[in-house]
Image (spheres, grey):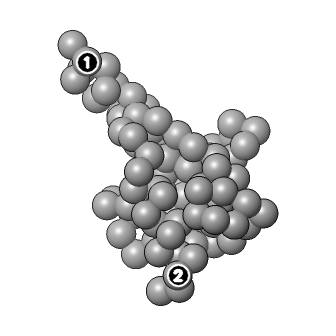
Amino acid sequence: MTLFAAKVYRVVLSIPLGQVRSYKWVAQKAGSAQACRAVGQVLKHNPYPLIIPCHRVIRSDKEIGGYVFGSKQKKFLLALEQELVKCLAG
């Protein structure tokens, strides 16, 4: 694993349950503001997609973007998390 990949995974782990961030945001937080596509490539090869929540990363234009298990599954996980947050909030 590269140093950049480790930074990307660390940043993605910091995204709160039920929230999303853009590839650009992740790139900036990982220290390479122009590396949006590189972030996508790192997340494409995420060895632990259920632990490192790469489904929480979307495109800057609010489109869903890619996901190792497919965009339908990504949408499902995001909706599930939003419902979970509502339930936990009371």
Report crowding for label 2: few under 14, some 14 to 19, many 20 or more residues within 10 A (C-alpha).
Answer: few
Q: Measure the alpha-carbon separation of dots 1 and 2.
A: 36 Å
Q: Is residue 75 above or below residue 46?
A: above
Q: Is residue 24 left or right of residue 7?
A: right
Q: Of the numbered discs in the image, which one, if any, rests on residue 3?
A: 2
**Could you tell me which residue is drawn at 46 percent across and 66 percent down?**
9
**Residue 23 in sight here:** no
**Residue 77 in sight here:** yes
**Could you tell me which residue is drawn at 36 percent across and 69 percent down?**
48
Instruction: Please identify, in this view, whether the residue under mark 1 or under mark 2 is nearer the observer.
Output: 2
Q: Is residue 37 above or below residue 16?
A: below
Q: Of the numbered discs in the image, which one, if any, rests on residue 41?
A: none
In the rendered image, the residue lying farthest to the front is: 31
Give residue 15's position: percent from left, percent from top. Answer: 44, 46
Amino acid carrying label 2: it is Leu
Under circle 1, the secondary element is helix
Query: Of label 1 and label 2, which has the lower sequence position?
Result: 2
**Could you tell me which residue is drawn at 43 percent across and 63 percent down?**
10
Q: Quadrant of residue 50?
A: bottom left
Q: Quadrant of residue 60?
A: top right
Q: Nearer the viewer, residue 62 or 29?
A: 29
Amino acid carrying label 1: it is Ala
Tally of numbered tags: 2
Q: Is residue 24 left or right of residue 51?
A: right
Q: Of the numbered discs in the image, which one, if any, rests on residue 89?
A: 1
Give residue 79's position: percent from left, percent from top. Answer: 43, 32
Give residue 1's position: percent from left, percent from top. Answer: 47, 86
Give residue 52's position: percent from left, percent from top. Answer: 38, 61
Q: Is residue 47 above or below residue 54?
A: below
